Amino acid sequence: MQIRPIHNEADYKATLREVSAFFEKEPEPESPEGYRFEVLLTLVEAYENKHFPIDLPDPVEAIKFRMEQSGLTAKDLVPMIGRINR
Protein backbone atom coordinates (compact mmCIF):
# COMPACT_ATOMS: atom_id res chain seq x y z
CA MET A 1 0.00 0.00 0.00
CA GLN A 2 1.31 3.40 -0.92
CA ILE A 3 1.07 6.31 1.48
CA ARG A 4 -1.79 8.65 0.63
CA PRO A 5 -3.74 11.40 2.40
CA ILE A 6 -6.45 10.58 4.92
CA HIS A 7 -9.69 11.89 3.43
CA ASN A 8 -12.37 10.11 5.45
CA GLU A 9 -13.09 7.85 8.42
CA ALA A 10 -12.32 4.67 6.46
CA ASP A 11 -8.89 6.01 5.45
CA TYR A 12 -8.28 7.07 9.04
CA LYS A 13 -9.12 3.63 10.45
CA ALA A 14 -6.99 1.87 7.83
CA THR A 15 -4.03 4.11 8.66
CA LEU A 16 -4.50 3.50 12.40
CA ARG A 17 -4.44 -0.25 11.78
CA GLU A 18 -1.19 0.06 9.86
CA VAL A 19 0.39 2.34 12.46
CA SER A 20 -0.62 0.09 15.35
CA ALA A 21 1.59 -2.68 13.98
CA PHE A 22 4.58 -0.37 14.26
CA PHE A 23 3.91 0.22 17.96
CA GLU A 24 4.35 -3.48 18.70
CA LYS A 25 7.70 -3.54 16.92
CA GLU A 26 8.92 0.01 16.36
CA PRO A 27 11.11 0.32 13.28
CA GLU A 28 14.65 1.68 13.36
CA PRO A 29 14.82 5.45 12.90
CA GLU A 30 15.98 6.59 9.46
CA SER A 31 15.13 3.25 7.89
CA PRO A 32 12.52 2.92 5.12
CA GLU A 33 10.03 1.51 7.65
CA GLY A 34 10.98 4.21 10.15
CA TYR A 35 10.28 6.92 7.58
CA ARG A 36 6.95 5.27 6.72
CA PHE A 37 6.01 5.17 10.41
CA GLU A 38 6.89 8.85 10.84
CA VAL A 39 4.89 9.94 7.78
CA LEU A 40 1.86 7.87 8.81
CA LEU A 41 1.94 9.39 12.31
CA THR A 42 2.09 12.87 10.78
CA LEU A 43 -0.95 12.09 8.61
CA VAL A 44 -2.89 10.72 11.60
CA GLU A 45 -1.99 13.76 13.70
CA ALA A 46 -3.10 16.18 10.96
CA TYR A 47 -6.41 14.33 10.50
CA GLU A 48 -7.07 14.24 14.25
CA ASN A 49 -6.24 17.92 14.70
CA LYS A 50 -8.70 18.81 11.95
CA HIS A 51 -11.55 16.45 12.86
CA PHE A 52 -11.14 16.02 16.63
CA PRO A 53 -9.77 19.36 17.91
CA ILE A 54 -9.19 19.70 21.64
CA ASP A 55 -9.83 23.18 22.99
CA LEU A 56 -7.58 24.55 25.68
CA PRO A 57 -9.21 24.50 29.10
CA ASP A 58 -10.11 27.62 31.04
CA PRO A 59 -7.00 28.36 33.16
CA VAL A 60 -8.91 28.58 36.44
CA GLU A 61 -10.78 25.34 35.74
CA ALA A 62 -7.50 23.64 34.82
CA ILE A 63 -5.98 24.69 38.15
CA LYS A 64 -9.07 23.49 40.05
CA PHE A 65 -8.98 20.16 38.20
CA ARG A 66 -5.29 19.65 38.99
CA MET A 67 -5.89 20.59 42.62
CA GLU A 68 -8.65 18.01 42.84
CA GLN A 69 -6.41 15.34 41.28
CA SER A 70 -3.66 16.09 43.78
CA GLY A 71 -5.97 16.42 46.77
CA LEU A 72 -4.99 20.07 47.31
CA THR A 73 -7.07 22.86 48.80
CA ALA A 74 -6.87 26.61 48.26
CA LYS A 75 -4.98 26.80 51.55
CA ASP A 76 -2.25 24.56 50.11
CA LEU A 77 -1.57 27.15 47.38
CA VAL A 78 -1.00 30.09 49.78
CA PRO A 79 2.82 29.71 49.69
CA MET A 80 2.75 29.90 45.87
CA ILE A 81 0.09 32.51 45.08
CA GLY A 82 -0.60 34.31 48.33
CA ARG A 83 -3.70 34.51 50.46
CA ILE A 84 -6.83 32.47 49.68
CA ASN A 85 -8.79 35.53 48.42
CA ARG A 86 -6.53 35.66 45.35
Image (cartoon, rainbow, N blue to C red):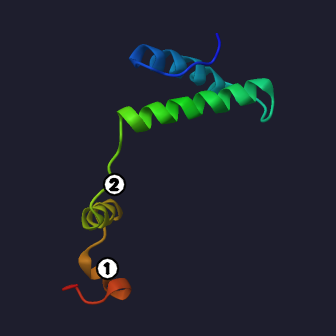
- Farthest residue toward the left? 85
Dot label at residue 56: 2
User: Looking at the image, is 66 positioned above or below residue 16?
Assistant: below
Q: Position of residue 10 (x, y in %)?
A: 43, 13
**Residue at 51% across, 15% down:** 14
Q: Residues within 10 Å of mark 2 (few under 14, many from 20)?
A: few
Q: Position of residue 31 (x, y in %)?
A: 81, 29
Q: In this view of the protein, which residue sits in the foreground, 68 or 2?
A: 2
Helix, strand or loop at mark 2: loop
Q: CA distance from mark 1 to mark 2?
A: 25 Å
Total number of numbered discs in the rendering: 2
Q: In this view of the protein, which residue sits in the foreground, 8 or 86?
A: 8
Q: Amino acid at mark 1?
A: Asp
- Farthest residue toward the top? 1
The image quadrant where one finds the C terminus is: bottom left
The image quadrant where one finds the N terminus is: top right
Helix, strand or loop at mark 1: helix
**Residue at 41% across, 18% down:** 8
User: Looking at the image, is 37 positioned above or below residue 78?
Assistant: above
**Residue at 62% across, 20% down:** 21
User: Looking at the image, is 47 positioned above or below residue 64?
Assistant: above
Label whose residue precedes the other's in the sequence (1 or 2):
2
Q: Residues within 10 Å of mark 1 (few under 14, many from 20)?
A: few
Task: Give the residue at mark 1.
Answer: 76
Front tag of 1 and 2: 2
Dot label at residue 25: none
* For residue 32, side relative to residue 40 (left or right): right
Q: Position of residue 57 (x, y in %)?
A: 30, 56
